[in-house]
Image (tube, helix red, strand yellow):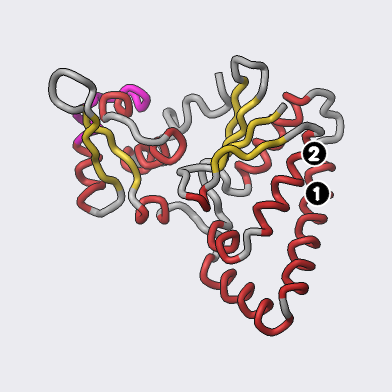
Amino acid sequence: MSSNDLENKNDVRQSVAERLMTLLKTRGEMQASDAGHLLGTTGEAARQQFVKLAKDGLVEAKAVSQGVGRPAQYWQLTAKGHAHFPDAHADLTVQLLQLIRTSLGESALDQLITSRESQTLDNYRQAMKGANSLEERLQRLTAIRTREGYMADWTLQEDGSYLFVENHCPICAAATTCQGFCRAERDVFRDVLEANVERTEHILQGARRCAYVIR
């Protein structure tokens, strides 16, 4: 079982609508019946909530043909729905990065990214002290990244590798402006996990999440 298998199921502080949106964010598109099951309610109750969210432009339904019979209805977040999750003061961040680039040059921006990478690496290395296995280091990294807003999770795959995913990117606007941030983060993962880390899905390339295979 992954670290977030029952995310928000028992979190009474969140509304049903918020929990449904979190499910779509962390698990991707799904049918109302599956969403209802995960939240401990009925598929019809989940469908009604999805319809309300669709009216607000936060989710949308798509029909998926499954052979004979009516197409199945799957729900997914819209761009507005994804934007519902925090993005670390996106506008200000982008403005500052653009100002650095235009006023001080690309080299200054590279220096900023390198300094951030170094500071992050130091913090993560401290957090890894005493972790003697890859799984333990991965568990700690997941906890750190989740606290930082990345909605991280990991699973052990059949071939013995690990899949580490980040369902949200709170620095997406900054990373879009300067993709050096993404390269730096991958390098940090490799260092603190002491393992090979390969990115297989990337939010900036249109995926719903960032995913990494770790060996």
Instruction: Answer yes or no: is residue 151 visible.
Output: no
Residue 190 x/y as whole percent: 77, 39
Closer to the N terminus: mark 2 or mark 1? 1
Locate the N terminus and report the quarter of the image it occupies.
top right
Q: Which residues are magenta?
A: 37-47
Would you say the magenta stretch is mainly helix, strand or loop?
Answer: helix
Identify the residue at image location x=53%, y=65%: 90
The amino acid marked with disc number 2 is: Val
Q: Find the distance from the CA under tag 2 to the CA under tag 1.
A: 7 Å
Image location (x, y in percent) of residue 179: 63, 59
> In this orientation, which residue lies closer to the viewer: 118 or 85?
118
Q: Position of residue 164 (x, y in %)?
A: 62, 33
The residue where tag 2 is placed is 192
Q: Disc 1 marks which amino acid?
A: Leu
Q: Is residue 106 visible?
A: yes
Toward the front, the furthest residue is 67
The reply to whether the magenta stretch includes residue 44 is yes
Residue 59 at what x, y percent from top left?
A: 29, 46
Mark linked to residue 214: none
Mark 1, secondary structure of its residue: helix
Task: Judge from the rendering whether residue 161 lies leftward or rightward of residue 122; answer left or right.
Answer: left
Q: Which residue is mark 1?
A: 121
